[in-house]
Amino acid sequence: MKAFALTAALAVVAFASAATAEPVTFQFETGQRTGVIMLAIYDSAQTYGGGRPVVAEALPVTAGVSEITLDLPVGDYGMKAFHDVDGDGRMNTNPFGMPTEPYAFSNNAVGNMGPASWDRARFSVSGATTQTITIR
């Protein structure tokens, strides 16, 4: 009887989690037709500043707009992305640490002497969400 109650409770939790997930679509405009878009989505200012993302994806670049749709639980998120033009799996930088490959943040936020802040990149998921991101 206890096993049944535990199983039923877990099923309710799983259903509730699935029911609160919403589709989030990112449309990336790169201006190029090769490489991979590497994106990471964070669910807090702390993780956005250097922690582990809740989602990390590699999206092949195609002609025109590359698009990905993810199901995310309701909440606040920030996205970082870069266009891995040479396909080596990492953001290339110059000797001073400045990126040499195009990059972008959710909301098309722009940083000041570094990545865009959480406050500028943060977006809320409470229903279907679409962002068109220009990678530059």
Image: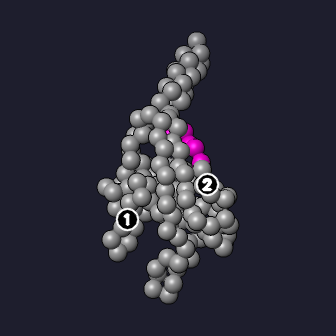
**Residue underneath mark 1:** 110
Q: Is 122 on the left-hand or right-hand side of 35? A: left
Q: How is the image coloured?
A: one colour
Marking on residue 82: none
Name the residue located 38 percent from the left edge and 60 percent from the top edge.
Answer: 109
Give the Cα distance between marks 1 and 2.
Answer: 21 Å
What is the count of numbered marks?
2
Residue drawn 50% across the image and 87% down it:
95
Q: Amino acid at mark 1?
A: Val
Residue 74 visible, this angle: yes
Instruction: Work out whether mark 1 precedes mark 2 in sequence or the reverse, and give the earlier one.
Output: 2
Q: For the stretch drawn in magenta, what is the main secondary structure? A: strand
The crowd level at tag 1 (other Cα within 10 Å; few <14, some 14-19, many 20+) is some
Query: Residue 12 placed where, x, y %?
Result: 52, 21
Which quadrant is the N terminus positioned in?
top right
Residue in the image at 42% along x and 48% along y: 77
Q: Residue furthest bottom?
A: 95
Is any part of residue 47 visible from this angle? no
Is residue 115 placed above or below 47 in the rendered structure? below
Q: Nearer the viewer, residue 78 or 49?
A: 78
Q: Is residue 38 left or right of residue 117?
A: right
Is residue 73 magenta-colored?
no
Residue at the image point whose x is 52% and y is 56% from the top: 40
What residue span does the magenta drawing correspond to? 68-72
Query: In terms of secondary structure, where does tag 1 sit?
Result: loop
Q: Secondary structure at mark 2?
A: strand
Q: Which residue is mark 2?
A: 66
- Within 10 Å of disc 2 (Cα), the crowding (few <14, some 14-19, many 20+) is some
